[in-house]
Amino acid sequence: MGTALREIAAELSGYRNLLRQFVIRDLRVRYKQAALGAAWALFMPALVVLSGVLVRFAMSQVTAATFDRTTVAALALKGLGWGFFAGAIGVATPCLATNGNLVSKVYFPREVLPISAVLAQGVDSLVGSLLLLALAPWLGIPLSTGLLWVPLLVALLFCFTTAVALVLSCANVFFRDVKYIVQVLLTFGIFFTPVFYEPAMLGPTGGRVLMLNPLAPLLEGMRLAVLEGQNLLMPLASATSRGEVAAWSPWYLAYSTAWALGGLLVSALVFHRVEPDLSEFV
């Protein structure tokens, strides 16, 4: 395993210029002859946020729950995270198959293709993050020590997304219907991820079940750290109509960390193992 990891690291380091060129190519292809151009980087996160605002406003009318700028800020934070994951996976899954001519005729580390898709989506998300930063005063986002958790959560989200992208991109080469399954899962996956709502709304059992989704602690941790200044190493309880519910536990962060780092390790090894066979099936 150590030898394989060293080979992967050495190859990616040696082809880092190629990786950069693929990222630039992906960005150019994405916006070439597009009516909105680079505005697509803002369109999808904005669509997620507007959908969430509509859902939460309807919920507030039925349950008399609070709907204010903090709610919109929470939707924006989690919408950016979900948009990055969904956008990267949607592009990375078919990337090996759509670049079949390169994969079958030219040698380079095949990991470059899905990783470049994730990095290109990261550029889009960075643009959305800058807009959110500009709107932070209006949204009431406070300055607190909780902001120190943001780099860690972003890094874990990137690692987890890359792990999923590596696995699904090579799986799609051997089973071409994987991309269609992924499209369905991404369409409905937002409802199984706490983007439009908080896990505590589902009660003690429902909240814990929802947190089994590795994305859930990362997005919810982002909301708590940024908007409430929560120290993610400390537990947090939330008062609901059903009584006091555990809104956060440090074990949630440990769980997502294990998925992100362990998943990246396993996916990299699996991808490296099947890489010699990709050119035959693509």
Image (spheres, rainbow, N blue to C red):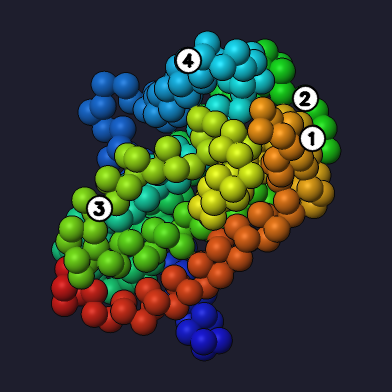
Q: Tell me the residue at 16%/73% (across/down).
A: 281
Q: Closer to the camera: disc 2 or disc 1?
A: 1
Question: Which residue does the numbered mark 1 point to in the structure image?
Answer: 229
Residue 189, percent from left and from top = 39, 43
Q: Tell me the residue at 25%/53% (across/down).
A: 181
> Residue 175 falls in which quadrant of the image?
bottom left
Q: Closer to the camera: disc 3 or disc 2?
A: 3
Badge 2 crowding class, 10 Å Cα cut-off, few under 14, some 14 to 19, many 20 or more, is some
Pointers 4 and 1 in contact (CB under 8 A)?
A: no
Badge 4 crowding class, 10 Å Cα cut-off, few under 14, some 14 to 19, many 20 or more, is some
Of the two numbered discs 3 and 2 on the same chain, state the one appearing first in sequence.
2
Residue 222 falls left or right of residue 100 = right
Residue 214 falls left or right of residue 50 = right
Q: Tell me the residue at 24%/74% (across/down).
A: 278
Question: Which residue does the numbered mark 3 point to in the structure image?
Answer: 181
> Looking at the image, is 230 positioned above or below residue 256?
above
> Looking at the image, is 247 positioned above or below residue 54?
below
- Amino acid type at circle 3 is Ile
Of the two numbered discs 4 and 1 on the same chain, state the one appearing first in sequence.
4
Of the two numbered discs 2 and 4 on the same chain, state the one appearing first in sequence.
4
Q: Gap between marks 4 and 1, in whole Å?
A: 27 Å
Q: Residue 18 carries which label?
A: none
Q: Is mark 2 on a helix, strand or loop?
A: loop
Residue 201, percent from left and from top = 59, 33
Q: Closer to the camera: disc 2 or disc 4?
A: 4
- Amino acid type at circle 2 is Pro
Badge 1 crowding class, 10 Å Cα cut-off, few under 14, some 14 to 19, many 20 or more, is some
Q: Is mark 3 on a helix, strand or loop?
A: helix
Pointers 2 and 1 in contact (CB under 8 A)?
A: yes
Q: Gap between marks 2 and 1, in whole Å?
A: 8 Å
Of the two numbered discs 4 and 3 on the same chain, state the one appearing first in sequence.
4
Q: Is mark 1 on a helix, strand or loop?
A: loop
